[in-house]
Amino acid sequence: QEQLVESGGGLVQAGGSLRLSCAASGRTFGDYAMGWFRQAPGKEREFVAGISWDGTRTYYGDSVKGRFTISRDNAKNTMYLQIYNLKPEDTAVYYCAVDFELEGSDLEIDYDYWGQGTQVTVSS
């Protein structure tokens, strides 16, 4: 059974850093683009970052450019999101997802499979 499991979330002070992981199982996701989204309380889910199937192309939402870095290790079937200089407005549930295409998208509707999410809470 295909599964995406996020980890690495938690409570952190503003200015701190976190690395989120997304472990895939049940299928070789290395053939597909993947991405991170987040959803804050009372808000719609927002695109954070995306990465092509081979990791050579990355793209980011405007609100996180310069502070977030997406990467992947296909040998480990795992994707990462490194977050620097966390801000209270980064508080959200972070979801990883896979787009069964090579290049990916910043549109939620294009993603085919989702994890359950990991909570990130940033205190001021």
Image: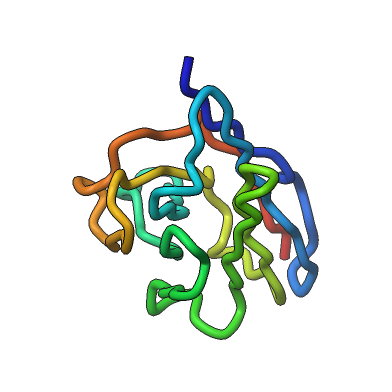
- The residue drawn where x is 41% and y is 64% is 52
- The residue drawn where x is 29% and y is 37% is 112
Query: Which is nearer the eye, 8 or 13?
Result: 8
Residue 59 placement (x, y as % from top left): 41, 74
92 in relation to 14, above or below: above
Instruction: Describe the colour scheme in one phrase.
Output: rainbow
Query: Which is nearer the eye, 24 or 48?
Result: 24
The residue most toward the left is 109
Residue 98 placement (x, y as % from top left): 39, 44
116 in relation to 41, above or below: above
Viewport quadrant of the C terminus = bottom right
The residue most toward the bottom is 66
- The residue drawn where x is 54% and y is 64% is 89
Residue 53 placement (x, y as % from top left): 43, 58
The residue most toward the top is 1
- The residue drawn where x is 62% and y is 42% is 77
Q: Left of 40 or right of it: where is 120?
A: right
6 in relation to 64, above or below: above
Count how many numbered circles sit on residues in the image: 0
Quarter of the image holding residue 83? bottom right
Query: Which is nearer the eye, 30 or 114?
Result: 30
